[in-house]
Image: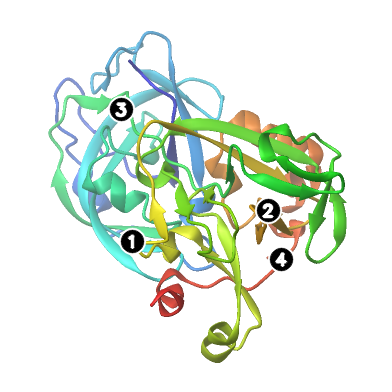
Amino acid sequence: MPTTFNAISVGQLADIDTTEGNNRAENAAALEGLTFGGPGNPLVNDFVEVSPFGNVGSAYDMDNSPNDQFTVDGGSPQSFDGTAVYNATITYVDGTTATYTAVLFQDTNGNAYLAPEFSNNADQAALEAGPIQSISLDSLLGNRYSGLTTSREEWDFVPCFVEGTKIITQSGEHPVEKLQLGDMILTMDHGFQPLRWVGRRTVPARGVLAPIRFAPGALGNDVPLMVSPQHRMMLRGWRVEVNFGESEVLVPALALINGDTVVQVEGGTVTYLHLLFDCHEIIYGGGIPSESFMPGEQGLSSMAQAVQDEIYTLFPELQTEGLHVYGEDARPSLKAHEAQILVH
């Protein structure tokens, strides 16, 4: 069954499928050596939502059939043209790298997109290992395909709390799913602040979407706590000061896994909730400090279009002036390899 999935838009490129009526993208090699994204322009901010349009079936075929159409972010229908696979290198926002086989597809106007995988395989794990800064197409791996499978994997990097997490508010601790717009939430820096937006999403608990569980005492928490892998926890103490010259830092939960008190839990489904304020805040979930949703750096464009529209309605300046107007992170953020110093 066709699915709606996130992909990364990489612009309008040279036509890879120059001759119709066959299963070969004849000009796919023309894209070898290209790099998309980079410092100051991370690909995590270039996510789009691809949805099937009409009766496309199980694959977008390379025959320019009028049935093989899709929409991007709810726009006008686009006709599928061709696909190719490349040996590629991912550079993550923290500077680390990985190799994988990149699936690129294109419409008849040359608009090109990097797709997630059709199964939860090693290449999808590489895509989901962290926010992506850039992807380089190192060499062509394959250009003879009948089309692109329309059912693709989930792909998201939104930091959030797991349903059931208790948040400290002006009227006591309440489960995150019970919070209402306007509730006064305790923040570390600005006292009680009104909650401006709540997002909710239920997803399979696997891969990048599987929650991170902190056992009681792992970070000073009295009760078990679960958050999404990219949710950043606030750390402090002498190790932070000695190694990084900061009194307090933010660290992605995924980087704190130690196989004992901090583990990733797969299986079933998980419901995540995102909390948005007038600025990036440090709030208290499960009794310990961690971040609220940050629409700029965390990749607002990786969220569904309807969710983006909600947030732009609340904060129209984000759309007209850019995500940078939301402000800076509440605390300095460590890279994944830096966080390993604190884990060990």
The quarter of the displayed image where residue 62 is located: top left
The kind of residue tagged 4 is: Glu
Vertical placement of residue 75 versus 222, above or below: above
What residue is rendered at 46% in x and 73% in y? 339
**How far, Cα to Cα, is label 4 from label 3?**
41 Å
First of labels 1, 3 by sequence position: 3
Task: Tell us which disc is closer to us: 4 or 3.
Answer: 4
Task: Tell us which disc is closer to us: 1 or 3.
Answer: 1
Does 157 sit left or right of 62 as displayed?
A: right
Does 275 sit left or right of 141 as displayed?
A: right
Label 4: few (<14), some (14–19) or many (≥20) C-alpha neighbours in 10 Å: few
Q: Nearer the viewer, residue 281 or 49?
A: 281
Rendered-image quadrant of the C terminus = bottom left
> x, y (%) of residue 63?
23, 18
Q: Nearer the viewer, residue 190 or 66?
A: 190
> x, y (%) of residue 219?
55, 66
Task: Tell us which disc is closer to us: 2 or 4.
Answer: 2
First of labels 2, 4 by sequence position: 2
**How far, Cα to Cα, is label 1 from label 3?**
45 Å
The kind of residue tagged 3 is: Asp
Q: Which residue is mark 3?
A: 81
Q: Which residue is mark 1?
A: 259
Does 332 sit left or right of 107 as displayed?
A: right
